Amino acid sequence: MPGHIDFGVHDVELLSRFTRSISLKTPIASSPMDTVTESAMAIAMALEGGIGIIHSKMSIERQAAEVRSVKRYEQGFISNPACISAKMTCGELIKLQEKCGFSGFPVTDIMTKAADLITAKEGIALREANQILSNSKKGKLPIVNPAGEIVGLLARKDLIKNQDFPCASQDQNKNLLAAAAVSVLADDRKERVKALVEAGTDAIVFDNRQGDNEDQLEIIRWTKSEFPKMQVIGGNVVTRRQAKNLLDAGVDALRVGMGISSVSTAHKDRGCGRAQASAVYNVAKIARVYGVPVIADGGISSPGHIVKALCLGAEAVMCGSLLAGTEESPGEYFYADSGTRLKAYSGIASSGVRGAVQDKGSLHKYMPYLNQSVRHGMQDIGAKSVPDLIDRALGSPDCVLNWQLNWTFSAMGKTDTQARPIFK
């Protein structure tokens, strides 16, 4: 409902949590569908302040390579840069470029003479190195150790990208954030998790249409045991009881949504699921007790739907069809009989169907439109931030805890005194 406005749309802050420890300046993630997110989409999403989830319908090696492409795309210092020999063939160079995801490599045995070479010493601060690079008007700044060996690199392109995308989602090393999906039912799920962790992914998103199952609980516990710092996202769930099982297993975020995407037939074929508004609201209530954010996944077909999801307690949304059809999504464009430019789009689960979406142009033009629309919606409501919206919907964490206790002991037939120790 509309609220009182005493601030400008530029005062609205979209900063929100994607997981317990990952925050985004744009609360939008691209869905792990093979027609939506590979490295190009993940790079563009991160540059615009969101995050991309690279799909798992590919080999382990290729998915890990896609993650590395994102992590290497924008860097502060490039650690251990790949140096090449002057004897390398063009074919070998092309293969190396494809593997690493970038095109520039130092050729140390034919470099500029030491007397004319501008370098920085190992251990230099990033800001100071940036200043040297800016003053030198060079494309690259080699970082060398006392023995004169190259141990790092700084690229001018990265300085320009930092200026163009001030809201970019980055880790503490200034690398773009990237997430990757893993199918819960795949036989190689543990090997895939290991490869993705090694590739540098920031979050593992476990894929399953009905997330409350023993296979998912087992892989969540195993992943948190093997890689305690890895952020794990579980789902999909639509009820409090489903959510509680995943929360107890240790997830750092929950995907909410079942059978409500534009290309899902789950409700029709299986008759099982839940309307998305009530699903997000109820799961967000119990997730708030655990300090875990909720991601509304499915049914987002306009920026207004993003606003509604945030109002109901989600801290981020996951979008498929909304982002499909952009230049950065996988696949080739084709033309309908009417002359409309289209791209193929399909659901991620077995119940998904194939379709097509209209060309939306570059994500770098589309995301600013989405962000500004969300800001205007929040301004009309009278909320300056995402946490403000969530507090309005769910109440303070203490109020939510009392609600959760009441629900638990009522369901179990226990008194308030008996139920309270369960949550201490």
Image: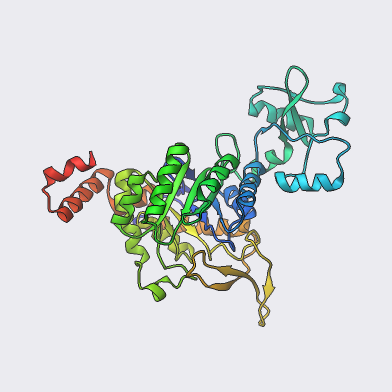
Furthest toward the top, the residue is 146
Residue 373 location (% of width, % of height): 49, 59
Q: How many marks?
A: 0
Q: Residue at x 65, y 47 (%)?
A: 65
Q: Can you say whether 348 is above or below 389 in the image? A: below
Task: Specify how the rendered protein is coloured.
Answer: rainbow
Residue 118 location (% of width, % of height): 80, 26
Which image quarter holds the C terminus?
Answer: top left
Which image quarter holds the N terminus?
Answer: bottom left
Q: Can you say whether 25 is above or below 381 in the image? A: above
Residue 136 location (% of width, % of height): 78, 30
Quick check: can you spot residue 2?
no
Furthest toward the bottom, the residue is 337
> Closest to the observer: 198 or 146?
198
Q: Residue at x 58, y 40 (%)?
A: 198
Q: Residue at x 86, y 29 (%)?
A: 109
Quick check: can you spot residue 298?
yes
Residue 348 location (% of width, % of height): 51, 64
> Closest to the observer: 368 or 217?
217
Q: Can you say whether 54 is above or below 133 in the image? A: below
Does residue 53 appear left or right of residue 269 in this picture? right
> Closest to the observer: 242 or 309?
242
Does residue 229 appear left or right of residue 313 in this picture? right
Q: Residue at x 71, y 33 (%)?
A: 154
Does residue 418 appear left or right of residue 96 in this picture? left
Does residue 209 appear left or right of residue 329 in this picture? left
Quadrant of the image occupied by residue 159: top right
